[in-house]
Amino acid sequence: MPIEYLIFLTVFTPVLVGGLNLIFHKTANVRDSVTLLGALITFYFSVNIFLGFDGQATQYKFLTIMPGIDISFHIEPLGIIFSLLASSLWILTHIYAIGYMRGAKEKNHSRFFLFFSVSIASVMGISFSGNLFTLFLFYELLTLITFPLVSHKGSSEALRGARVYLSILLGTSIGLQLLGIIWIYFSVGTLDFVKGGIIDGSFGPFELIILVGLFAFGIGKAALFPFHKWLPAAMVAPTPVSALLHAVAVVKAGVFTVLKVGVYIFGVESLSVSGATDWLTWLACFSLLFASLIAMTKDNLKARLAYSTISQLAYVVLAFSLANSLGVLGGALQIITHAFGKITLFMCAGSIYVATKKTNISDMQGLGRVMPITFLSFLVGAISIIGLPPMGGSWAKWFLIMSSLEADKQFVIIVLLISSLLNIAYLLPLVAKGFYLNPADQKEVKSFKEPSAFIWLPPAITAGSSFLLFFYVDYIRNFMVNFGLVG
Amino acid sequence: MASEIKEGTLDLINHLPILQVITPMLIAPILVVLNNKTLSWLLSFLGALACLFISVLLIQTVSDGSTLTYSLGGWAPPIGIEYRIDAANSILLFLISIISVIVLIFSYSSLHVEIPEEKHTLFYACFLLCLTGLLGVVATADIFNVFVFLEISSLSTYVLVAQGSYLDRRALSASFNYLIMGTIGATFFVIGIGYIYMATGSLNMMDIAERVSELGDSRTVQAGFAFIVVGMGLKLAMVPLHVWLPNAYTFAPTVVTCFLAATATKVALYVLIRFVFSVFNYEDSFVNELFFFLIMPLAIIAMIAASVIAIFKQNLKKMFAYSSLAQIGYMLLGLSLVSEKGLASSLVHMVNHGFTKAALFMSLGAFMLNTKNVYINSLQGLGRSMPFTSAAFVIGGLSLIGVPGTAGFISKWLLLEAALGSGYWLVAVLIIVSSLFAVIYIWKIIEVLYFSESSESYSEVNVLTLTPIWILSFFCIFLGINTSLTVEVANMAAEILFK
């Protein structure tokens, strides 16, 4: 099948699935099976794009809106990785969501699955965007589509969280990112993604710094300090949303955009020559330490994970700011490994909630003994996030350290080491408490057990994947190098 | 592109400029004679449909950059009255006539709620006269004729606004207020015309343009220009001459509000544009400086202040009336950049905002059919009970914010590009700030619609009411994806006006 059809199908299938959700809203089992099938088909299409990719970055024009402004798509390694990541994790999250939504007795399942599917469609659109305008279109769509998911419960607390979510994401993207996009269009005359960047020489050194700022802050989904508040606010959403959207789709769409803009709009070369991102290195370092420190103070498990995500996202922004090929590699690997690690942690948090209705870490003493699979998965995910072998996450940190050496910014290494120590300090105590401490109420804990396989299996699979990533990282690296993401 | 003038021969296309204006004008008295409610609706609808058909023909004829002229009664200009259609006004003729068609579909099912049945015939007659006036203002190239048509449309508008009094007596004071302000505006305008006639001895736009440039630095012409700007400022609700607008929009019947919000102020703005570019010389310092020192600051104030005020309004019609003021600010801002891009962005925004605001007001009207008022609290939970109307409202709202993929985004993009092109950095930032305010007030409503429980249960309005709403929402999306109708014609128009 020609690649343009495949792109269309990967974007369109989730939308179709969303529509079918509405049609089958009366028969839950049919609806959920259709969605699962849709997720599998979407994944199949993304795999086909991956297999059909020949390294040629052809632009596929879909629609011309105004002369010079098109909706167009193109295929490149970063986008392929992102689409594979999102579509494969969608399958697992969907299985998990079926169990969770029923187990936790959430309401309005059809609406939930409808928006869930359509949000995947916008993620696919983001992955294959051929220019900044198309990317922006799907980026905004993703914000709007995920709003009903965040506010799903409809309580005033959920609404408040969703309002923060929406106002920061829309505010930054319309207020800063759009300005940056129009500025580029105005100065360069094109918005196409071209390897090596398009802005070469069109901006002075000072202007370039402002432009980097417009994108670094304007891509609010990357949750860089001080625009990170939406992420903890969005944790009012049901856990499957937090898992897929706030460990994979939404936040990764943010850092993916950062990397994509870095490689295909600014160009790694011109960034490193101009030094326009030097300030961003410091800010990213600050953001990642700061978020880790806050994470330690949070007793609510999801809130802690949210701050941990903020910290981990800053790694990718850091990778962008280091402005060299190793950094881009490290950033891309961080996107992959963190996705698997964090989705594991979120799903485990959800399992614990469904099984015990507990959300605070201090209440989880002794739970590991009755829910061993969940807690072991959590342990594996946590080790990957921390960046210890033998989990995939260690490679991302490895490349980042190499990259900071190449960029001659040794202080970054120290920051990364401190951050890893902080990660240990806020992620591992839960596991230790779960396995070693005696619960306050023995009887109550005895009554808990692992929830249904729908719920415990997906995190176990993602945890296993984190482990496998450690051994197959070279395959990913080769893919990115051979297909010309980095020189 | 050379403007080839198509001389009048016997083929129909040359008579279209006048046919379009005269059709609704002739139907109006027939309605009064027939005095039948259903028949009046049908005839008005057919008349508006004819106008739409003609305007589509016209836009096709002139979209290549040519100009279509028509001499009324065979008297050649500058002595006789000339009708002159080019890209700039053809796009407005299209907007006015399509909105009138859509609004009339809506009125079939909504009017009986707002106006007693025995008044329907008169209502439609006034509506057609208003349509005549607006089309006439846009089509004519004779400045006194502009005044005449402006008054035809304004007088009928006062009546139409006053019809809201059956639901809320405050419509009467709103209408009276509008009458006073509108008349002051018209008086200023006619005084301005008087000055120009005094200085040049002509009423034909093209003719005046030649004579004005020969006159050089003339106090009389400058005074005339000042009067015209103030007069039109009143009619187009330029801040601070806007005080009539919020109440008039709030208390008028929904049909009228939709129609006015989408067309009336835009027509006044068009007159201003026409005078600046086709009658006066935009390169003259008194025109240029006026834009820089007066219109641009006022436009920015409108953009920001009106948006902020809109956030705090509980009556949604009033909220969107203030939002309209802000949007007029965008259009004035584009114009005040005095650049081809700025002007094109203004023209595009006129059309895009016309559809967007009509969609919003009309869905409010549909809510009102159920809830009887449009206070924000009465919309609670309607997202569930009236899903189709609410969805259309959301689309309109997104377009008002300027979310990519909607018509509003295109206008905002063009305006930002134009502002950057003229080197106004700060202005670009302010445009964005103003759209962020729009996010706030639109989202307030969306939250009420979808995320609060309703105390009463309503049912969705019927298909006939939904159709026009969805046509408008469809245009909000369509014009955001396909811009050949708006951007290309507007660019052509800007090119012609800047010649």
Image (cartoon, coloured by chain):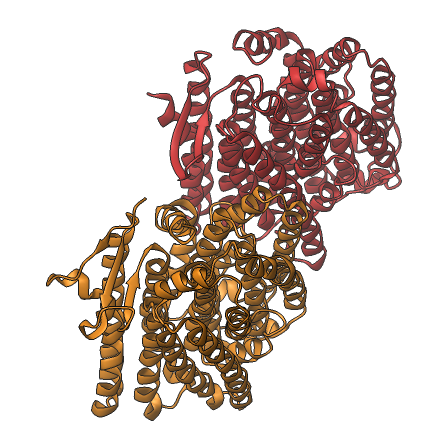
Find residue B453 and report its horizontal and vertical position in percent: 59, 66
- The number of numbered discs placed on residues in the rendered structure image is 0
- In depth, the one of A103 and B22 nearer the eye is B22
- In which quadrant will I find the N terminus of chain B? top left
Find residue B50 and report its horizontal and vertical position in percent: 22, 68
To which quarter of the image does residue B271 belong? bottom left
Residue A324 appears in the rendering? yes
- In depth, the one of B126 and B70 nearer the eye is B70
Residue B451 appears in the rendering? no
Chain (orange): B
Image check: B56 left or right of B260? left
- Vertical position of residue A472 compared to residue A133: above or below: above
Going 65% across and 57% down the picture, which residue do you hit? B437
- In depth, the one of B357 and B390 nearer the eye is B357
Chain A: drawing colour: red
Image check: A226 left or right of A50? right
Going 42% across and 51% down the picture, which residue do you hit? B494
Find residue A219 and report its horizontal and vertical position in percent: 65, 36
The residue positioned farthest toward the left in the image shown: B10
- In depth, the one of A94 and B85 nearer the eye is B85
- Vertical position of residue B441 compared to residue A158: above or below: below
To which quarter of the image does residue B154 belong? bottom left
Going 66% across and 39% down the picture, which residue do you hit? A242
- Vertical position of residue B340 compared to residue B285: above or below: above
Image check: B126 left or right of A300? left
Find residue B383 and report its horizontal and vertical position in percent: 51, 63
